[in-house]
Amino acid sequence: MQLSATTLVVDKVDMPSITASAFTSALSQAANGVSVVTTAYEDMEAGLTVSSMCSVCADPALLLVCVNLDNPFCALAEQSGRFAVNILPSHCMELATVFAGLGDQPEQSRFDSGIWTTLSTGAPILTNALVALDCKVDSTLVKGSHRVFFGEVVDVRTTSGEPLLYTDRRFAVVEPVPL
Ligand SMILES: Cc1cc2nc3c(=O)[nH]c(=O)nc-3n(C[C@H](O)[C@H](O)[C@H](O)COP(=O)(O)O)c2cc1C
């Protein structure tokens, strides 16, 4: 069926919208990997647990992560121009909880959990991350409550193992399907 330009404009005007809770409830059914994104500037560091990380394109090597504007990570990553994505292995659920602010650990001592190092940019890299992606900030944009960080991956470290997942508002692990 061919749509005329007029039909498209009318459709856009009449398009219904859904509530934020319908949106989050629907997307809670998706299964996502869990990462801790980190940044550092001078003697300050910030990090949070995210499930929004995804690849954008391979050439150039770009990924994105969406971070709530209230999170201190946003200001620090913009200042430093760098961040790291630490994709968590299945045994790092406790660390994911700490960096989501769900435990009773104060924000300033989150990095006491885990062993940290750096690669090229100086952003904190978790030594036992399943995959660590060291990025320089390519660009950012604000959409609603979140800032989208596009990161150009300048260094990467991979290990092997199973990833930690998040689905149906809880952590989960991969159960391989028998062939
Ligand atoms: C599995 C999981 C995924 C999350 N994904 C994101 C995300 O993609 N972006 C985001 O801004 N916050 C995300 N959060 C929330 C943050 O980790 C954090 O709880 C929130 O920003 C409050 O952080 P604060 O305690 O550092 O202020 C996620 C939390 C969990 C448990």
Image: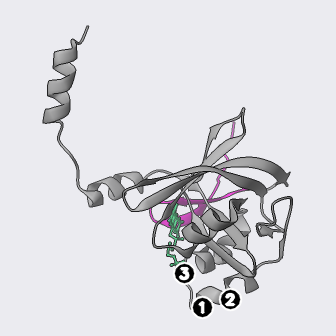
> Which element carries disc 3, helix, strand or loop?
loop
Q: Residues within 10 Å of mark 3 (few under 14, many from 20)?
A: some
Pick the front one: 99 or 176:
99
Q: Residue 127: horizontal and vertical position, in percent?
A: 84, 68
Q: In screen coordinates, is 16 left or right of 108? A: left
> Does the CB distance between marks 1 and 2 fall below 8 Å?
yes
Q: Residue 148: horizontal and vertical position, in percent?
A: 52, 53
> Does the CB distance between marks 2 and 3 fall below 8 Å?
no
The type of colouring in the image is one colour
> Which element carries disc 1, helix, strand or loop?
loop
For residue 33, what is the image quadrant? bottom right
Q: Is residue 79 above or below residue 101?
A: above
Which residue occupies 75% across, 86% down?
A: 112
**Residue tagged 1:** 106
Q: In screen coordinates, is 149 left or right of 14? A: right
Which residue occupies 55% across, 58% down?
A: 51
- The answer for how far apart the CA atoms under marks 2 and 3 are is 11 Å
Specify the amino acid type for callout 2: Ser
Quarter holding the N terminus?
top left
**Residue tagged 2:** 109
Which residue occupies 65% across, 72% down?
A: 93
Residue 101 is labelled as 3
For residue 50, what is the image quadrant? bottom right
Pick the front one: 157 or 81:
81
Q: Is residue 150 above or below residue 38?
A: above
Task: Judge: label 3 CB < 8 Å from ligand 1.
Answer: yes
Q: Is residue 160 magenta?
A: no
Pick whichever of labels 2 and 3 is earlier in the sequence: 3
Segment tinted magenta in the rendering: 162-179
